[in-house]
Amino acid sequence: CSLRGSVFPKSMMWAVPHAVLTACLHYLLSDSNAAKSAGVGDVGSNVLGGFSFILGFLIVFRSQQAYARWWEGGTLLQQLRGEWFNAFSSCIAFCNASQDKTEEVAHFQHKLVRLISMLYGAALSQVSEMRSNTFEFLDMEDFDADSLEFLQATSNKCEVVLQWLQRSIVEASDANILKIPPPIL
């Protein structure tokens, strides 16, 4: 059972002392003379009932809002993954099929896979609230150490990787590795 990322410890910090206080007050006021002298009766139970209803309503409303936001975030991440996969598969489909470009096409495809891996990992680390935002990437053999250090130091990792990706596509188009008709590229 992992409590990392859970709201349970913080909520217990607030709930337990108040539950103990409530139990003590209930015990002290359970004697009818003490309850009458404190002025607790039907009015107190009505106020407590109203308070409990409003508190329950707010908790349910906030929980529904949080769940809806979580579900929307998950849906957007899956949509992002699908869009990027579609773009990646389009680049693979438009690669030059001639025999004299086979090695260059393979090198471009491998670099494209690494860049998409880096892009998705950078996007996940940007939206992640975990203490350790380390995600596994495919190997980085196409990238020099200076570029990777720059990527590590920047706060806009997605934008940097996206620029690298776009630049690689343009360079591949110029080298006739990608054969994309003009309206598409």
Image: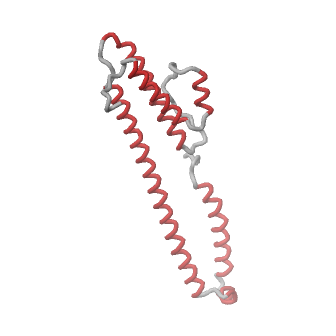
Name the colouring of the figure: secondary structure
Residue 14, above or below 170: below
Query: Residue 151 location, x and y as percent?
Result: 58, 30
* Residue drawn at the location 50% of the way across and 35% of the way down: 121
Residue 5, above or below 89: below
Instruction: Name the quadrant containing residue 37.
Output: bottom right
Nearest the camera: 37 or 9?
9
Instruction: Name the quadrant containing residue 169.
Output: top left
* Residue drawn at the location 58% of the way across and 55% of the way down: 8
Outermost residue, top side? 100
Q: Quadrant of the C terminus?
A: top left
Nearest the camera: 151 or 56?
151
Outermost residue, front side? 182
Residue 126, above or below 116: below
Residue 128, above or below 168: below
Query: Residue 161 location, x and y as percent?
Result: 51, 31
* Residue drawn at the location 45% of the way across and 24% of the way down: 168
Nearest the camera: 77 or 30?
77
* Residue drawn at the location 51% of the way across and 75% of the way down: 53
User: How many numbered marks are there?
Assistant: 0
Query: Residue 64 location, x and y as percent?
Result: 46, 61
Query: Residue 114 location, x and y as percent?
Result: 46, 26
